[in-house]
């Protein structure tokens, strides 16, 4: 195995693809720490800690801590995954989309373009719901400018991750969206293991990540 990895790095094209993928992943992890403007992160962390153990923990795992940090990547790639599922299901119900799917490379490009538009629309809806709900909870200032800024920021963050995933697929090692999802989950492992140790070994409640 190690010999195969070593040989892979000897090939310039493969080495460049691996390097490109690593750079993109570093950018993602950096973006997951950039907070949405106007959000009270300390208040949100306390609110999140009160809901630990339910669906919020699963969401935070999929987003690699971006949700807990209320970063610009808080929505992560979930809108894209949802959009892909919706388009796949619609290809069964809508003959026009089914034709596109069977129309070779051109058809797949059209479906990919539709998926992108649906992704942005879903991200906009989710970001709007989150921003309004968090403003009502006092997690962020309750004024139009802050809410609009949060909506635009989170929507742009989700679109950016979709773009990164596609670039990794084209210029990196492939399966960009899957790689983004996996690196998010892996990045949470140290904190999750620490939480399990605190709860089951020391009998303390879960600690929230900053």
Image: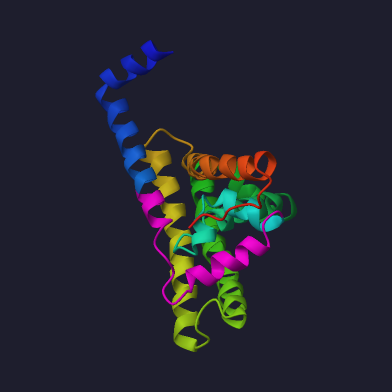
| Residue appearing at x 47%, y 53% in the figure | 162
Q: Nearer the viewer, residue 65 or 118?
A: 65
- Say which of 49 and 12 sits in front: 49
Asked if the magenta segment contains residue 49, the reply would be: yes
| Quadrant location of the N terminus in the rendered image | top left
The one of 80 and 44 positioned closer to us in this rendering: 44
Give the quadrant of residue 96.
bottom right
Residue at 39% over, 62% down: 34
Rendered location of residue 92, percent (x, y)? 73, 49
Residue 21 placement (x, y as % from top left): 36, 38
- Is residue 45 highlighted in magenta? yes
Q: Residue furthest top?
A: 3
Outermost residue toward the front in this view: 202
Q: Quadrant of residue 195?
A: top right
In the figure, 13 relative to 61: above or below?
above
Q: Compared to 120, does 11 lie above or below?
A: above
Q: Residue at coordinates 54% horizontally, 52% vertically from top-left?
A: 63
The way the protein has been coloured in the rendering is rainbow
Q: Residue at x 47, y 74 (%)?
A: 39
The part of the chain drawn in magenta is 27-53
Nearer to the camera, 2 or 102: 2
State the image coordinates of residue 148 (x, y, percent, origin top left).
47, 80
Answer yes or no: is residue 75 visible: no
């Amino acid at each position: 195995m190690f010999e195969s990895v070593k040989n892979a790095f000897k090939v310039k094209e493969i080495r460049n693809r691996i390097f490109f993928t690593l750079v993109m992943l570093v950018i993602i992890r950096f973006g997951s720490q950039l907070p949405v403007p106007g959000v009270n992160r300390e208040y949100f962390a306390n609110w999140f800690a009160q809901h630990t153990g339910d669906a919020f923990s699963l969401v935070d795992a999929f987003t690699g801590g971006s949700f807990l940090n209320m970063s610009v990547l808080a929505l992560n790639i979930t809108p894209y995954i949802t959009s892909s599922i919706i388009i796949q299901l619609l290809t069964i119900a809508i003959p026009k989309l089914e034709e596109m799917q069977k129309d070779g490379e051109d058809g797949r490009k059209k479906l990919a373009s539709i998926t992108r538009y649906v992704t942005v629309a879903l991200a906009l809806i989710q970001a709007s719901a989150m921003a309004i709900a968090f403003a009502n909870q006092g997690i962020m200032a309750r004024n139009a400018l802050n809410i609009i800024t949060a909506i635009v920021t989170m929507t742009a963050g989700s679109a950016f991750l979709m773009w990164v995933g596609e670039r990794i697929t084209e210029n990196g090692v492939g399966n960009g969206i899957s790689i983004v999802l996996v690196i998010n989950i892996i990045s949470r492992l140290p904190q999750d293991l620490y939480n399990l140790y605190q709860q089951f070994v020391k009998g303390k409640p879960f600690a929230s990540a900053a």
